[in-house]
Amino acid sequence: MTTPADRRSIIVGIDGSPTAVGAARWAGAIANRQHATLVLLSVVPASDYHLTAYSRAEVNLLPELRAVAKQKIEQACAAVRDEQPELEIRKIVEDGKPARELIAHSTDARMVVVAAKSRDRLATLLLGSTALTVAKKAACPVTVWRGRLDRPQPDARPVLVGVDGSPGGSAAVGEAFELASALGVEVTALHAWNDPDLLQWTPVPDTWSALAQQEEQLLSERLAGWCEKYPDVTVTKVVEKATPAQALLEHAEKAQLVVTGSRGQNRLTGLLLGSTSQNLLHHASSPVVICRER
């Protein structure tokens, strides 16, 4: 199923790292299936960014930095072209700050993809500041890509989505169905209900058994419209008594990507990520898609 959103661009931040090339190859496969344009964006540090007054006085590094950025974009483009020869690709080199420019381009984008800095699941503090900032502030879904460099393309595993009652959670469900439909895979819809924060979205009954039944009904209600819109997508429903982060990380081992809401509810809190999103970004071994209500 093709929607107007599918025809917009998917933007990938290119910094010359192998993980950024892996992210570009993954995004290229997604863009090809969603009939979107792939935009490879490399940002050259502006003169006030990571350059001291002394170094600026000694030499103007910008021309050399721009040339290196163009070379890195060409390398990433060639890697994508090898696998998606018909894909429309745009290449952009801009001066500025990486996070700021990616956020600026997110306004009219289908998705922004940034690479996590570390492939070591224990090195949680190495999630790049650019990736974290973009995930917090972008106007469209953001994928923080962490995966195998030898196999970055989508595969046959399901798309895992965390389902709650929040507006951001609803956006995540829609994104998960859209991606699963494009990839021809199933959706695993997970609702974890042993979390006080989630209980604010629904009245709490008197007994645990009644609560469990209520949470199963809530999951079915949250999925009903999307199952009708995407009849080609098979859905596996999972309801667990656990914290969302714990449950999603456990099920993420069998999924090719995880989709979750940001839990941002307005222009102020939308700049923050909930604890579940933060946990996934730092610990998940697969790409994580962060969604907020537009």
Image: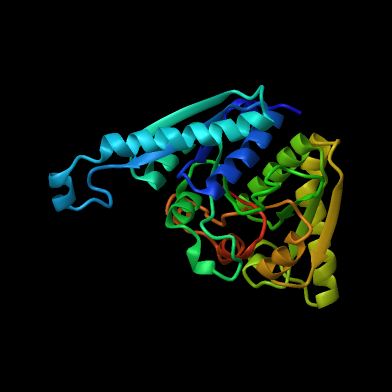
Looking at the rendered image, the quarter that the C terminus falls into is top right
Asked if residue 294 can be seen in this view, the reply is no
- Residue 3 point in image, percent of width and height: 68, 27
The residue sitting at 81% across, 38% down in the picture is 184
- Residue 112 point in image, percent of width and height: 54, 41
**Is residue 187 found left or right of 168 in the rendered image?**
right
Display colour scheme? rainbow
The residue sitting at 51% across, 57% down in the picture is 117
Looking at the rendered image, the quarter that the N terminus falls into is top right
- Residue 75 point in image, percent of width and height: 52, 35
Q: Which image quadrant is residue 63 in?
A: top left
The residue sitting at 48% across, 34% down in the picture is 73
Q: Which image quadrant is residue 276 in?
A: bottom right
Asked if residue 131 can be seen in this view, the reply is yes
Q: How many marks?
A: 0
Decide: is 37 above or below 13. above
Decide: is 135 above or below 240. above
- Residue 85 point in image, percent of width and height: 66, 24
The residue sitting at 74% across, 51% down in the picture is 256
Foreground of the two, 158 or 222: 158
Decide: is 29 above or below 167. above
Q: Which image quadrant is residue 25 in?
A: top right
**Is residue 10 found left or right of 223 in the rendered image?**
left
